Amino acid sequence: MFILKKPAPEGAPTHRTVIRTGAQQYGILIVLVAILIVLLALRPEVLSLENIYNVIRRFTVLGILAVGMTFVIASGGIDLSVGSILAFTGVLVSIMMNRFHLPALFSTIAALSAAFALGAANGFLSSQLKYRSFIVTLGSMYIIRGVTLMLTDGVAVWPLPDAFVRINDLAIGTIPLVTFLLVLVYFAAHFILTKTYFGRQVFAIGENHVLARISGVHVDLVVVVTLGISGLLAGFAGVITAASLISGQPMVGQRYELEAIAACVVGGASLSGGRGSMWSTLAGVLVLSVLRNAFGFLGVSSYLQMMAIGTIVIGSLAIDNLRK
């Protein structure tokens, strides 16, 4: 006996389509929940206040870097200089306060301005030389790190004023101020990327920069601004890091650029450009932060941690390729 199924209306989503769409939208959250369940089963102390604070502290810096990286990746670029800009900004703000005794607020604003200028310079060189930002920021990564080491002779700059160091102790209710600022950054970035003409230009360039230019998009200016935003947020992360370490460390931030890229990719951003979401990036940051924390609790060696993160990134790229 044969049972005839009523065909789905033309254009109606099939079960397979619904499952695939759900996996694309919520897969990263499913992974995060699964990691938490396994970790709680193995080590219940993961929910201790001290551990949660450690996760938030690491999550904040990576989360800020990933916001700027999302802008760059959505436009079809890559910024490899964010770790170096982070270190440079932390050292610069420390030098201004420690050696020249300038006010903390003035030093912070000046250092952030310098970080934006470095990012914008990356964008200017990329647009004028007609090279991909990957190549330009690879070179600037070494140049900026070299300048940072030259300014400090490779030695940390400290001590720093109490007014600056107390940034990490400030809180709004029970929420640390830096975490509150991180949330504001994500909301602002989400609004810019999804609700403004600039955000539409970013995605248009990522989809096809030639067609975007023909359509009237000022491609060079958008590239400069996106990399400027990335530099500014890297500088913001550098200021927070300097306050946390109570010093300007010239070697801090190494491999941070790779983790920021990994968070964006795990969150579903396409390295070919044209796709990216701040909330998906935030979920990717959470996954990597919780995973790092889980490895620490389980005593996994740093070598295996690097291998695991790399495997996750390659798997995310494979899923992105299949999605296309």
Image (cartoon, rainbow, N blue to C red):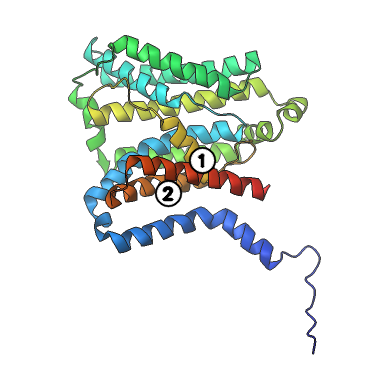
Question: Are dots 1 and 2 in contact, CB under 8 Å?
Answer: no
N-term-proximal mark, 1 vs 2: 1
Image position of 254 with respect to 23: above or below: above
Quadrant of res 209: top right
Relative to 153, say whether 262 is above or below: below
Residue under pointer 1:
264
Q: Bin the neighbour count of mark 2 within 10 Å (Cα to Cα): few under 14, some 14-19, many 20 and up.
A: many
- Please report the residue visible at 30 percent of the width from the left and 61 percent of the height from the top: 42
Near-viewer residue (119 or 287): 287
Picture coordinates of residue 189 (x, y %)?
Answer: 50, 37
Going by the numbered disc 2, the residue's amino acid type is Val
Residue 74 lies left or right of residue 115; in this view the side is right
**Residue most toward the bottom?**
1
Confirm whether residue 307 shows in the render: yes
Q: Which mark is residue 287?
A: 2
Q: Quadrant of residue 108?
A: top left
